[in-house]
Structure formats: structure tokens, C-alpha cells
Image (cartoon, grey):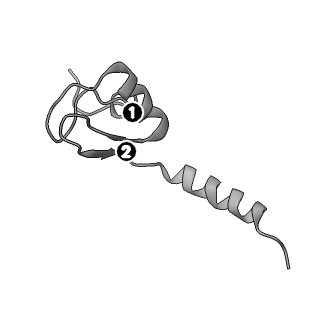
Amino acid sequence: METGKSTEQSDSLEFCPHCGHRLSPWQQVLLRVDRALTCKNCWYRIILDVPGKDENESDTSIEKIKPKG
């Protein structure tokens, strides 16, 4: 018996949280990769939370691009 969602379950949504329409396997892959998807049934924008670790990595890459003056 499961009491909470595992990380694997939270990463892959099978249904739109807004209208309950089943997402196709391809839409599920896009959602896992892009972390955002628009439901083709109700046009609800599904956006998954990005862990704080990725925010730090993007900040680091921006600092590398900035010219030092």
C-alpha cells in the first residue's frame, strides 16, 4: 500500500490534472523532458516543478557566458 508518490510517479503524469484526459505516451515523454506541456483536450498548460538543483546549474552557466570586465 502506497501512502505517497514516488519520484518516478511524480515525473510521469498519465492524465491531465485539469480535465483528466489521458496523455499519449509521446506527450508523457515530452513532459518528462521539457517539464511543460499543453493538454490537447482542454489547452491547460501543465508545468512540472523544477528541482532547486537545476536552478543553480543554470545560474552557473549564465555566469560562464557573461564577459568579465
Q: Whole-percent x and y of residue 69?
A: 85, 80
Which comes before the other along the chain, label 1 or label 2? 1
Near-viewer residue (62 or 7): 62
Q: 48 or 10, which lies in front? A: 48
Which disc number belongs to residue 51? none
Could you say which is closer to the camera, residue 7 or residue 18?
Answer: 18
Residue receiving disc 1: 11
Residue 29 coordinates in the image, percent (x, y): 43, 26
Using a 10 Å C-alpha cutoff, classify the residue at mark 1 as few (fewer than 14 neighbours), some (14 to 19) or many (20 or more): some
State yes or no: discs 1 and 2 in contact (Cβ < 8 Å).
yes
- Amino acid tagged 2: Leu
- Reply above or below: 69 against 16: below
Mark 2 = which residue? 48
The kind of secondary structure element at disc 1 is: helix
Residue 33 image point, x, y percent: 49, 34
User: Real-space Cα distance between discs 1 and 2?
Assistant: 8 Å
- On screen, residue 52 versus residue 38, left or right, reads right
Identify the residue shown where x is 18% and y is 40%: 42
Under mark 1, the amino acid is: Asp
Residue 52 vertical position relative to residue 26 in the rendered view, above or below: below
Residue ID at (20%, 20%): 1
Q: Is residue 32 left or right of residue 5?
A: right
Q: Is residue 67 left or right of residue 12?
A: right
Residue 28: % across, % down: 37, 27
